[in-house]
Amino acid sequence: MSPIGVAPKSMTMTEIKAKAKLRGVEPGKMKKADLIHAIQIAEGCAPCYGRSNGDCPWAQCCWRSDCFKAKV
């Protein structure tokens, strides 16, 4: 587990596509944010990537390091 305040490294598109396939999501030519939203939905989560405006209670989210920077 990462210490508080240290963000994990961002996932590459190759890693994101692999995660999508494991969740039954076919990445095709989806844009990064759309693909992450599809993964979040497949996992039973709200598709919140890039929409938090810096206010997110999910400290252990694997998308967190990119989420605050993303503009969706």
Image (cartoon, grey):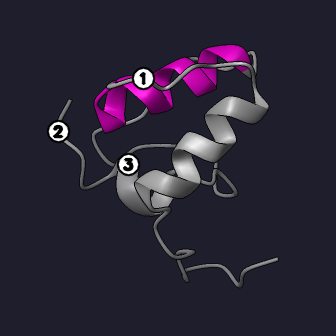
Residue at the location (44% across, 63% down)? 65
In the figure, 11 relative to 27: above or below? below
Q: What SS does tag 1 mark?
A: loop
Residue ID for mark 3: 67
Q: Is residue 49 magenta?
A: no
Q: Position of residue 72 (x, y in %)?
A: 20, 29
Q: The magenta stretch spans which residues?
A: 30-42
Q: Is residue 30 left or right of residue 20?
A: left
How far across and how far down the image is residue 41, in percent?
Answer: 62, 14
Kindly identify which residue carries mark 1: 28
Residue type indicated by callout 1? Gly
Disc 1 from disc 2: Cα separation: 21 Å
Tell me, yes or no, if residue 14 can be seen here: yes
The amino acid sitting under disc 2 is Lys
- Relative side of 66 to 23, left or right: left
**Nearer the viewer's eye, disc 3 or disc 1?**
1
Q: Is residue 28 above or below residue 57?
A: above
Provide the secondary structure element on which disc 3 rests: helix
Q: Residue at x 70, y 57 (%)?
A: 60
Q: Is residue 55 left or right of residue 69?
A: right
In the rendered image, which residue does mark 2 sit on? 71
Predominant SS along the magenta part: helix
On screen, residue 3 above or below 9: below
